[in-house]
Image (cartoon, rainbow, N blue to C red):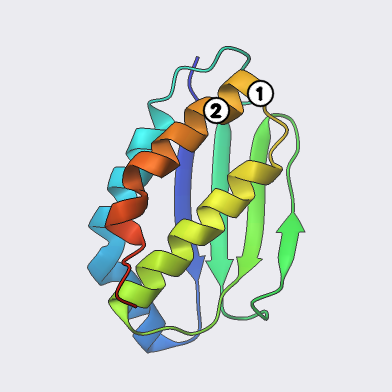
Amino acid sequence: MKMDVSLTIAVKDRKLGKSFRRIYSDIELLTSSLSSCELSHPIGQRILIIATDTEGPEFFKDNSKHGEFTYFVGIEPLSDDVLLKRRLFEIMKEVFENIPFTIPDHEKYREVFAHWEPSFVKADI
């Protein structure tokens, strides 16, 4: 069984919103790859991560229930596409580490993140 994975933003900063739209295709490739993982022990149906600039970068709220895993995460208002792409990757990776998957399922997701990390985390930043 697979879990549907998605990431969206809820922001006030227009530059952040525009930057997200520019990098959305890259984010979609990552979420599609995560969604295609066949889990040994699925714990739900959906993982939704909502990044928001209405709270500080340290903000984290778990609003999960009944197999629907929803996380609200604060993000600083970044308008640089490369920095935003990197930060959203880091947010997703951190959220997945906090979801109570079994060890084999955590390993599958870690492999996906390791595969995509070079595309999201540039060494020259």
- Please say whether residue 82 is visible from this viewpoint: yes
- Dividing the image into 4 quarters, which one contains the C terminus? bottom left
Q: Is residue 90 left or right of residue 43?
A: left
Q: Is mark 1 in CB contact (under 8 Å) with mark 2? A: yes
The percent coordinates of residue 109 (x first, y second) are 50, 33
Q: Amino acid at mark 1?
A: Ile
- Please say whether residue 45 is visible from this viewpoint: no
The percent coordinates of residue 47 (x first, y second) are 56, 40
The percent coordinates of residue 10 (x first, y second) are 52, 70
What residue did someone put label 2 on? 107
Cα–Cα gap, marks 1 and 2:
6 Å
What residue did someone put label 1 on? 103
Density class for disc 2 (Cα within 10 Å; few <14, some 14-19, many ≥20) is: few
Residue toward you, 83 or 29? 83
Residue toward you, 67 or 41? 41
Quadrant in the rendering for residue 51: bottom right
* Number of on-image labels: 2
Q: Is residue 3 left or right of residue 34?
A: right
Residue with the most extreme front position: 123
- Is 10 above or below relative to 30? below
Looking at the rendered structure, the secondary structure element under dot 1 is: helix
Q: Amino acid at mark 2?
A: Glu
Residue visible at 42% across and 32% down in the picture? 35
